[in-house]
Image (cartoon, rainbow, N blue to C red):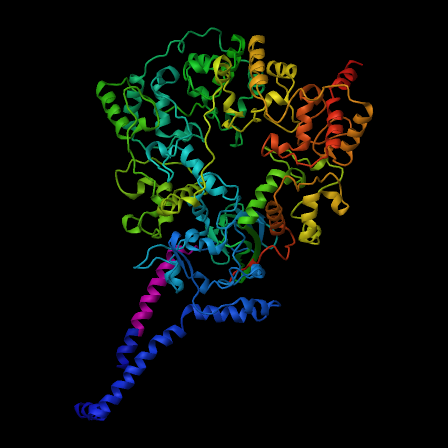
């Protein structure tokens, strides 16, 4: 009886080990170099609808102690379940960089992405990047923002849209400006959007939108403003860290 | 051993009383299994977890009062919904639980529907009646409807909502791509309302292709359309060299000439690149046509084909004839008839012909076609269903060339063949088919498209919305798409507007493009003299706008004919354009309007009246507005801009009649005279 059990156990472990080793063999990348630090090149703090890909890929760079780019270092991406990376691990290219496409999870909120590499003493070096998934209401808000608000509240111009920010005597607050906007209550934001800047003794250059936007539109806009603010707003949704 | 067994038997079943007792005990124990199973069930575990999670919250008492133990169920017979999801997802309706990261306890995000009216599985799929996580969320042997991944969730909106919604960008894009990418040329898609999804692309006719281009170009294009133009929507049929040779042979042999296309060059194509570039810019060709720049970026519009390598494609004679009047070759084309002078045609043709790529045709050497090759090419054209998209002389559009996709979103998994390593779910299958259609079996005909991952997701979303539930829903839930208008202006002005392709950019009475302003009520809005001048020499109204109306070189007669028609026909019943005078307002009223403009309403944030002080870049410049718009239109616009032009971003300020009248007086006094006088000095 005992012998049979131990035999089965050995067999089981062997099968398990074999299957594991085959799996790791096919996916493991062997680093040819090790860095000392990992830095974000681009792609942090982006917004995308829940479950969809970020508009731009996330690019990170591995540097050595002198700050020079390291080629061939292994970089791994990890995040809360539901977040997918393409690729999830890769070796740095000739400029020391790894580019990955990220699709966020199915729930609105902030997602923390942990990017890691190993240094020369085989210790893990981490970098944390935050990305923002927008739920239904926040996506509506994002659309309204692009249609009505962005032209003044976003200082950056694009090929399609010239920003009006620089033309305004009193500068509007970008919606990511958490230091200012987080201090305003939902009721205050509703008042400014609905009745214009003068409702809170602010500039009349901010017109009243209460007859143009529906109440639910204003709520959607506020949900969007809360979701994208930096530093995060308390009502911007939970943080999904790796668990 | 035997002894032991016998004594055990004796102890347990030695006499009838003992046997009865033992059997009763076993029976009792087995009776306890069911309650025990129930007691240790997953939903009970999650409900315990919920209760311990809310214990530490400040609103614990309220939450505990709302909490109902036991299996919960949403039952909606008319939707076929029996959803027990709320047994574990306990906090779905708790307004305060938005910050909970731990599932299944978070509040459902804000959506425009009530959970009690629609349940869960109508949108999320999955097994509503199941009470374990695995059975509810995954495919099992008995049920094969897994939870819909979040990235496709908008497909469920499309079950009822047949038209575009502002909250479903992905579904809107996917439906758009279905119509725009040629999918519905081959795959029939019948919608639950009985209509059929129509294609919105316009693949060119191939019946006269030899007028336009060479057999070598056709061959190179067939081999790899994207090598000619990265934005080409024609998919790659992965043809062998021989097949491409034979199809090109057939298409050229099958082509019949159109008189006028091969006319000898009336003027020599000019080779002045600067003049060509400036005419190309002035004519706003880039509003519709894109060109790939040196950095590899595609710059320009997507209404017309990309022109990066146009010089390697078209014959010079054809291009001249096309630029002179595109309607000779393709009567319904979206391209306007520009009425260029001969010199302009030569300049523009020369400029475009210089856009060549010597690599494109360098390796293409075709011998003269044999009758066998042409016959084989004809067979291939029929096999690949080329006539599904293109008009080809001698071919009828094939019926049911590819499988119908009307209910693809409900296709049972048992009927699908998956690629190895692919997750066995319907969305993965659909996305896989779009990404690599030929990989699923040898001999498949569906060509290779060049969709981005986001476009694949959008298409999959749109296809998943075509499912059985969209047919079985109560008709009262269906939200119809806004009706399509096929408005066409009548008579001679209508012909002129078709010739100028006004509807490629402008919308009138619900028909037309959205690149330029809606002209439905243009007659109430503008002054006659301004419109005549604008037709003859269109200027830009918005300082930040890159696109503007091109100059069509209209004759005086044409300009006044168009103006008369628009002034008479395109009038709003809400605006009587003669109700208010264009001048004669009191200085006091004008001054009051100015104060309102710069003070209370701060219009200078978006508009410019005084070019020295104002900088607003969003709305039209208003320096000449008094010579452009009617006073009645300005007044009504002040009162409610969205009533005149739905969707305009000018905010409705709910102005009093006095404010609106004063602002109208101020604006109508801006005739642009000051600037001209200053210039004279």
Q: Is residue B598 visible?
A: yes
Please state the horizontal and vertical placement of residue A56, each as a whole percent of the image: 53, 44
Please state the horizontal and vertical placement of residue B261, each as a whole percent of the image: 40, 11
Residue at (65, 16) in percent of width and height: B530
* Residue A81 left/right relative to A129: left
Q: Nearer the viewer, residue B350 or A32?
A: B350
* Residue B127 left/right relative to A81: left
Residue at (61, 33) in percent of width and height: B642
* Residue B540 left/right relative to A1: right
* Residue A199 versus residue B71 in the image, above or below: above
Please state the horizontal and vertical placement of residue B276, each as a whole percent of the image: 55, 16
Q: Nearer the viewer, residue A109 or B217?
A: A109
Q: Which quarter of the rendered picture does the C terminus of chain B lie within?
A: top right
Please state the horizontal and vertical placement of residue B51, each as a whole percent of the image: 52, 70
The quarter of the picture where residue B551 lies is top right
* Residue B69 versus residue B314 in the image, above or below: below
* Residue B158 versus residue B259 in the image, above or below: below
Q: Which residues are magenta?
A: A9-29
Q: Nearer the viewer, residue B154 or B194?
A: B194
Residue at (58, 12) in percent of width and height: B559
């Amino acid at each position: 009886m005992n012998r049979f059990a131990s035999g089965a156990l050995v067999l089981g472990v062997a099968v398990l080990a074999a299957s594991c080793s085959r799996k790791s063999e096919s996916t493991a990348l062997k680093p040819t170099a090790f860095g000392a630090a990992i830095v974000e090149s681009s792609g942090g703090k982006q917004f995308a609808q829940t479950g969809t890909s970020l508009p731009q890929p996330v690019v990170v760079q591995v540097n050595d102690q002198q700050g020079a780019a390291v080629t061939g270092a292994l970089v791994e991406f990890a995040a809360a379940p539901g977040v997918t990376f393409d690729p999830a691990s890769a070796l740095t290219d000739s400029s020391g960089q790894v580019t990955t496409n990220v699709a966020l999870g199915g729930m609105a909120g902030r997602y923390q992405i942990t990017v890691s590499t190993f240094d020369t003493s085989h210790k893990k070096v981490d970098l944390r990047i935050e990305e923002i998934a927008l739920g239904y209401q926040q996506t509506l808000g994002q659309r309204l923002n692009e249609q009505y608000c962005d032209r003044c509240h976003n200082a950056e111009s694009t090929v399609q849209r010239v920003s009006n920010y620089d033309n305004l005597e009193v500068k509007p607050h970008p919606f990511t400006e958490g230091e200012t906007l987080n201090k305003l209550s939902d009721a205050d934001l509703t008042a400014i959007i609905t009745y214009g800047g003068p409702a809170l003794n602010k500039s009349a250059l901010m017109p009243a939108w209460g007859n143009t936007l529906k109440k639910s539109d204003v709520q959607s806009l506020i949900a969007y403003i809360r979701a994208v603010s930096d530093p995060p707003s308390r009502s911007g949704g939970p943080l999904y860290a790796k668990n | 051993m035997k002894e032991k067994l016998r004594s055990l038997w004796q102890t347990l079943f030695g006499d009838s009383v003992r046997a009865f007792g033992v059997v009763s005990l076993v029976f009792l124990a087995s009776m306890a299994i069911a309650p025990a199973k129930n007691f240790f069930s997953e939903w009970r575990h999650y409900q315990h977890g919920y209760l311990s999670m809310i214990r530490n919250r400040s609103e614990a008492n309220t939450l505990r009062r709302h909490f109902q133990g036991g299996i919960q169920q949403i039952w909606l017979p008319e939707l076929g919904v029996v959803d027990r999801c709320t047994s574990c997802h306990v906090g779905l309706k708790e307004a305060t639980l938005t910050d909970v990261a731990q599932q299944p306890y978070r509040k459902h995000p804000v959506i425009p529907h009530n959970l009690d009216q629609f349940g869960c599985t109508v949108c999320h799929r999955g097994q509503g009646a199941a009470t374990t996580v695995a059975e509810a969320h995954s495919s099992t042997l008995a049920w094969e409807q897994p939870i819909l991944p979040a990235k496709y969730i908008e497909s469920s909106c499309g079950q009822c909502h047949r038209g575009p919604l502002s909250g479903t960008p992905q579904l809107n894009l996917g439906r758009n791509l279905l119509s725009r990418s040629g999918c519905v040329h081959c795959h029939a898609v019948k919608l639950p309302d009985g209509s059929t999804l129509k294609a919105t692309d316009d693949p060119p006719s191939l019946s006269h292709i030899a007028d336009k281009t060479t057999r070598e170009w056709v061959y190179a294009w067939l081999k790899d359309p994207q090598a000619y133009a990265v934005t080409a929507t024609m998919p790659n049929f992965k043809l062998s060299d021989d097949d491409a040779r034979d199809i090109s042979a057939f298409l050229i042999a099958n082509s019949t000439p159109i008189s006028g296309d091969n006319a000898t060059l009336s003027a020599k194509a000019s080779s002045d690149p600067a003049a060509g570039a400036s005419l190309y810019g002035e004519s706003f060709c880039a509003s519709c046509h894109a060109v790939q720049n040196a950095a590899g970026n595609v710059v320009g519009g997507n209404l017309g084909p990309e022109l990066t390598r146009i010089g390697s494609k078209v014959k010079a004679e054809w291009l001249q004839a096309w630029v002179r009047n595109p309607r000779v070759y393709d009567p319904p084309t979206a391209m306007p008839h520009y009425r260029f002078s001969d010199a302009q045609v030569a300049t523009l043709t020369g400029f475009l012909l210089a856009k060549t790529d010597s690599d494109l045709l360098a390796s293409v050497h075709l011998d003269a076609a044999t009758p066998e090759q042409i016959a084989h090419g004809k067979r291939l054209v029929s096999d690949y269903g080329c006539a599904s998209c293109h008009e080809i002389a001698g071919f009828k559009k094939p019926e049911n060339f590819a499988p119908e996709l009307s209910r693809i979103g409900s296709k049972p998994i048992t009927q699908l063949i998956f690629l190895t390593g692919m997750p066995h779910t319907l969305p993965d299958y659909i996305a896989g088919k779009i990404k690599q259609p030929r990989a699923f079996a040898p001999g498949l005909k569906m060509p290779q498209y060049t969709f981005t991952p986001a476009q694949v997701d959008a298409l999959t979303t749109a296809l998943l919305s075509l499912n059985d539930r969209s047919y079985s829903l109560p008709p009262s839930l269906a939200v119809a798409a806004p009706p399509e208008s096929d408005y066409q202006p009548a008579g001679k002005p209508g012909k002129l507007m078709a010739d100028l392709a006004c509807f490629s950019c402008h919308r009138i009475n619900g028909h037309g493009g959205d690149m330029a302003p809606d002209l439905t009520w243009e007659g109430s809005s503008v002054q006659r003299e301004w419109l005549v001048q604008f037709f003859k020499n269109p200027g830009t109204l918005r300082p930040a706008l890159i696109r503007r109306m091109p100059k069509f070189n209209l004759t005086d007669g044409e300009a006044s004919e168009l103006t008369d028609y628009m002034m008479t026909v395109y009038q709003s019943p809400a605006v009587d354009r003669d109700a208010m005078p264009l001048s004669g307002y009191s200085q006091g009223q004008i001054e009051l309007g100015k104060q309102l403009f710069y003070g209370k309403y701060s219009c200078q944030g978006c508009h410019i009246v005084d070019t020295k002080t104002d900088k607003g870049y969003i709305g039209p410049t208003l320096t000449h507005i008094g010579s452009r718009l009617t006073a009645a239109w300005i007044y009504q616009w002040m009162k409610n801009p969205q009533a005149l032009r739905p969707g305009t971003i000018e905010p409705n300020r709910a102005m009093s009649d006095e404010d609106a009248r004063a602002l109208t007086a101020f604006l109508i006094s801006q005739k642009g005279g000051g600037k001209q006088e200053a210039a004279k000095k």
